[in-house]
Every structure is written in structure tokens, then in C-alpha cells.
Amino acid sequence: MTSVDLTTETEDSGPSGYAAARLRLLQEKAQSGPPRRAALARLTDDWLSALFTAAAQSTGVRGAALVAVGGYGRGELSPRSDLDLLLLHDGSAAAGALAALADRIWYPIWDLGLALDHSVRTSAEARKAAGDDLKVQLGLLDSRAVAGDLGLLAGLRTAVLADWRNQAPKRLPELDELCRERAERQGELQYLLEPDLKEARGGLRDATALRAVAASWLADAPREGLAEARRVLLDTRDALHLTTGRATDRLALQEQDQVAADLGLLDADTLLRQVYEAARTVSYASDVTWREVNRVLRSRSARPRLRAMFSGGRRPEPERTPLAEGVVEMDGEAVLARSARPERDPVLPLRAAAAAAQSGLPLSLHAVRHLARATKPLPVPWPADAREELVTLLGAGEPTVAVWEALEAEGLITRLLPDWERVRCRPQRNPVHTWTVDRHLVEAAVRASALTRRVGRPDLLLVAALLHDIGKGWPGDHSVAGETIARDVATRIGFDKHDVSVIATLVRHHLLLVETATRRDLDDPATVRSVADVVGSPSTLELLHALTEADALATGPAAWSAWRGSLVADLVKRVAAVLAGETPDEPEPAAPSAEQERLAIEALRTDGPVLALHAQTETPQPDGEPEPVGVELLIAVPDQHGVLPAVAGVLALHRLTVRAADLRAVELPGEVGPGAVLVLNWRVAAAYGSLPQAARLRADLVRALDGSLDIPARLAEREAAYPRRRGVTAPPARVTVAPAASRLATVIEVRAQDAPGLLHRIGHALESAEVRVRSAHVSTLGANAVDAFYVTGPEGAPLPAGEAAGVARTLEAALRG
């Protein structure tokens, strides 16, 4: 370890000498990480010691000490860390002299612009403050003398530690609750795209809490990997401070590339994965530690009653309840039975995990570590009972998560499924996703466990859910890569050839139903036939349907709704009919609903647009509350040029966010009057404020259609007046032609960053390309718009391949311009 020579750098005890030495230290590339933090703490100690000594001499104060607490007390100073200081005194000095002493220390710190958390207290006052404020007590546990009367601090430390240990039964539950509340506010560091390295669950605050628990002597955290995890989080925070020049703990997206470079890492994804792994270590250690704390406290509270029941002072043996062969419950945990022989029973890890999850119990740390040390690898392919235990584990529901994490923490998952390593802690930069890839896969299995009664082969559903995104650890299309990996894994765990083929099909096409239902015209027979050809059998269809729902529910709230579920269910019903032998002819025009027909008749009668607004809620959720989805807006307009961009532009002007949209032409019966009417069914929500009145929307739409309302100019004016805040640069829009998606029209797919006026720009570009939009299917997933447009030439036929490609290029250029 190298260190900075401070003999010359600290000769000037004033701010300028310290500032220059500090700057040199922070700019020294050869020294970083723990050595730099320790050197910065020593440098700061020397400067503050000189300040204190000079101030004490000039003020005549005796019986005082300058004390570093918190992170500074631990000698872990990051570039922009606060200086957390206590001026401790014995009460003998006059108040004026004491104030003068404090001013001579605090003001030079403030003059340098350093953040300072300071207090002036006697030992008794410090103990009282610690008793009143848990955060003060935690800081004093890491106190360290910088200068002055060392005996004064030694006495305080002894008293504070004694208080902490004596009051542990009361204070530790307070600390546990404090950690839980903070986790609720800040989220879990290991899953956040912009994590707070200090406050989020699994961050530096939790690591400090574990030190406090250890100091209580009541319980201790699992130490393996914990010091390294803290180092990773501290190193990342150091680089973040140097990159931003600010005292920030939030690892924002725009800083991640530079922080990764400063740490010598390949890219931002590598950085996040490293941070997630560290956070996972801290989180798991926290879970185990708090479980042990609560067990000890329960035991202590029960001991007086037990003593009265048992004579001779003998402690009763803990009750051991059998759960499975070699597995018992004891003290609220699943542990190994005394007769268990892991070295002779390679299925025991899966059996223990399945028994724990099915019983809703945590798997004890000692048991997992014993299994990791002693168990031999399973033969390949696995025996049938191993496969059954895996399926049982996956089917246990929510308790599966904690048990799976315990196995992962000791390396058992990657030993059982080597391909898991590539998805472990892998970030997902799509904001629709709540979890990392590996946790998303486990969550999908949890969601699938609630759907097993809907399928004939729940084992295939659960395994496919666990593997459906396994290809995200490899380059290229994750579904294509995942099919190959899933085939290997399914063979490894002992499925026969037919079942392996089904699992591979489910993984390869796990996005097929939701993408088809939301982006394709379900009234087009080619759409339904294409899905039926891929699925092949009713049993595979029901599995794919359940997997689709489980995947979406495990992704996040933006990925699934009753509306999206109804579209998928409609598609599944149509595909099931084809698989049952029905062969539908070319589609008849879709029958409009009664309200659509009424609006269409009114639009023909008035020769203008007609609107209807309806508040929408989804079906009640499990908690009984309906899921709000905004407003349904129905618009009927006599078929004419420019309807799509006009409607989309008016909605953008009124700050309405389009969540989903469907456009189709409706032919009315002859007796009503000849002519086609475009019916647009929109699901919209106000970006902010209240919804506009239908009359205002209609008036602006009339003006947009007759050309008197210049929508592009109005949108440009608003953009200039209220420019969007600079954020992360989104990937460019991508426009493709879907091959053989329909025999009736050309399908053009648009994937772009959602933004006000996006749909107006798309519609305007399609109109400029002189194509007719036969139907449109628009959906928004988080910040991403995924739209499909069925277009024809002016005569109503699909576009030739070359012309279709040209339209796609023109549209892509318009969106990038």
C-alpha cells in the first residue's frame, strides 16, 4: 500500500496548504480506493489537529478533544464526504472560550467549502443525545480521536458501547425498522437503474448498520464477501464524486460511462453489474443478520417463562419438525436434519430449498453453506427426483425468491445451472423492467405458479418461465439465443425430447402473443394462421398464453393491463379455433359496436368529426382496487386525407398522452348511406392537469382537417417556449417492414422514443408518402412507442416490396430529423 508523504504538504496548517495537498491527492491516479480514502483521512487529521492545537492554545481551553465520527471516524473519506466532527469537552471551560475554540475550527472548514456536520458536547450530553437519537448513537460507535484529550474520548467510547450493548434489545428493533423504512423509500439498490449507493437497500447505510449489530454482541453478519462489497460501493462513490464534482450518492445514467472508465471497467453495464453484486451481498447479509437478531430476542423474551417450567436450569432442546427427507424446521428456519448426509445425497440442496419454499421458511445460512461445501454435483441428465424438486421450488410462489437468493449467495444456482452466470445481476436498461434479468426470471416463475391450474403441464410452464430470458446474457436476439440455451438446460435437467422441444418453443416465442395482439390486425386471417403455425398444438398454446401473462406481470406495471390481456385472450381464442380445424375465409368487415355505428352515422350526416369521451378503469385488481387507465376517446370521421396526423396532432396540442390507439375503416349498411367512415379508438390520459372538453377537441379537429390549424407550427412554438429537460440520449427510431404479416396490406412497424407529437409526425410522414392507412395499432411501453400501421397503395393493394422499403426509409428519416 502506498501513502502520501504529508511532511511538506501539511507544513502550512492553513486552508490553502491543506487544499493544495488534498487536490494533489485526489488527482493522483496511481492511488485510489481504500489507500486514497485512508490517506485523505490522515491528511485531514493532520490539518484539523494543527487547527485544534493552535486554537486550544490561543483560547486557553483544556480538557477538550476533537473527535471524528461516522465515515470520517472509520477513516473512509470520499472526495466529497462531509466532515462529521464532535468537539468533546469536560465542562470546565467557560462558554465564551469554548465557542471561540469551536469557531477557530469550524470556520476554516467552511472557508474551503467543505460540508461540515458538527456539535459541541460533554460526555454526558453526548450520551444523552445518543439515547435520544439512534443516528447519533450509530455515529459515536465509529468515533475516533483526531486531537486533544484522548482519555476523554476513551471514556465516552466505553460508555457509549456499554449503553449500546445494554440497550440492544430495545435499540436494535428501532434500527431494523429504520432500515426497512429507508428501503421502502429508496428501493433496492441491486435493481435500480440509477441507484443511491448510500441510502438504497443493500447500500452503504445497510453496511454500517451491520457493523452496529456486530458491536452489540447480539448477532454478527456473514462476513464472507462483505468487506469486498463495501469496498466496491465506496470505490464507485469515490469515482462518482470525482466525475460530478459534487457530493452525490446517486449513480445517474449520464454519469455511469465515465464512472466505469475511471474505475477501469469495460462499460456502464459492467459497472452496474458489479454494483448490483455488491448490493446483493449486503442485502443478503442484512436478511440473515436481522433474522438472527429477531431469533435471539425472541429466545431471550421466552427464557424467563421457560426457566419457571424447567427445573435445574437446563435449556430445553429446540423443537425440530420434519419437512422432507434430511430437512427439518427449527427456530423458524429450514435446517438440515442430524441424519442428513449432503456428501451422499446430491439432490439434497434442491430438496431442502423446495421444502423451505413450500413451507414459507427461510433456508438457514448454516444449512446453505454446509450444502455448498459438502454436496457433490448432480449427474447429467438429472435424476427424476431432482427435476421434481426444482419444479416444486419454482411452484412455491413468493417464498421462492428468498430461498433462491440464499442458494445464489453461496454459488449453488450456478453450480446447478451454469448458464445462469450470464444473467446473474445483469441490468436491463429498458425502464419498463423492474428487475435485473435473473430476478425477473425468478419473478416470472413466481407469477407462473399462480397460473399452473390453467395448463395441463405446469412443470413445463414453470421451467419455461425460469428460462424465457436466459438468452439475454448472449449477443443477438435473446429469444433466438435463449432457444438454444433452454434446449440444453431442459436436456440437462432430464426432460425427454418432446418436452425439451416444447420448452424451447416457449422460450423462442415467448413474445409472440403479446406482440401480435398489440401490433397486428387480428381480423386478418394471415395474422392468426402465422401464430397457429408457430405454436402447433393446443397444449403449447395454453402454455404460451400463461407464460405471456407471467412474463408481463413479472416485468412491471407498464407491461400488462386488463386491456392488453383481453387482446391476448382474443388472439388465443382465434388461434385455438384454427388449431381445432377451423379455416376462416377472408375476413368480413368488422362489425362496429352500437356506439361506433351511432357515431359513424352522425359523422356521415354532419360530414364532420364526432367525438365521445368515456372514463375507463380496468377490472378490479387482487386488492380490490380498479386500475385507472385514463379515458377512452372514440372519434368517427368521414374517410378523407390526413385524418391520422390531424387527430394525433390535436391530442398532442391538448397534452394528451396516447397509451393505445386503434384505427380502422367501417363500411356502413347501404340503407344508412354509402361511404366509409374512419373510426379511431384511443386510450388517452392527460400529461398533467384536467382533460379537455370534447367540444374543444372537436373544434380543433375540424380546423386541423380544413387546414386552418397549423399543428406543426403550434407544436414547434410550444417546444421552443418549454424545451424538454436534457436527459439520456435515446436510441434512434427504427422503422421496418414486417414480411408476410398480411395478405391484405403492408405492415410497417415503428419503434421510437415516446414524445409529444410523435404519432402526428408518423401520420404526416405516411400521408406524405401517399399511402393509405388501413388500420393502426399503437401501444406505449414506458418511454417506448411500439406501433404497427397496415398501409396500402391508393388503389387498396399491398405495396410492392421496393416501395414498402422506401416508405420505411422515408419514415425513419422523418423521425430522426
Image (spheres, rainbow, N blue to C red):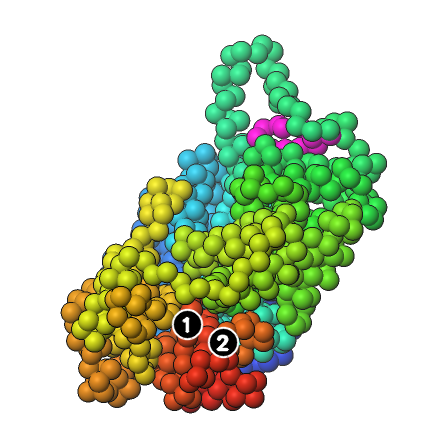
Closest to the observer, 384 or 215:
384
**Mark toward the start of the polypeptide (2 vs 1):** 2
Question: Which quadrant does the N terminus fall into?
Answer: bottom right
* Position in image of residue 787 (x %, y %): 45, 72
| Callout 2 amino acid | Ala
Which residue is drawn at the image coordinates 21% and 75% (left, top)?
Answer: 608
> Is 335 contained in the magenta span?
yes
Q: Magenta: predominant secondary structure element?
A: strand
Relative to 526, is 162 on the left or the right? left
| Callout 1 amino acid | Ser
Q: Label 2, label 1: how many angstroms apart (C-alpha)?
A: 9 Å
Question: Which quadrant does the C terminus fall into?
Answer: bottom left
* Position in image of residue 205 (x %, y %): 47, 55
- The magenta segment is 326-336
User: Circle 2 sits on which residue?
Assistant: 745
Image height check: is 679 above or below 150? below
User: Circle 1 sits on which residue?
Assistant: 775
* Position in image of residue 709 (x %, y %): 21, 85
Closest to the observer, 510 or 695:
695
Residue 412 in sight from this viewpoint: yes
Residues at discs 2 and 1 in contact (Cβ within 8 Å): yes
Classed neighbour count for the residue bearing mark 1: other residues with Cα under 10 Å, few (<14), some (14–19), many (≥20) = many
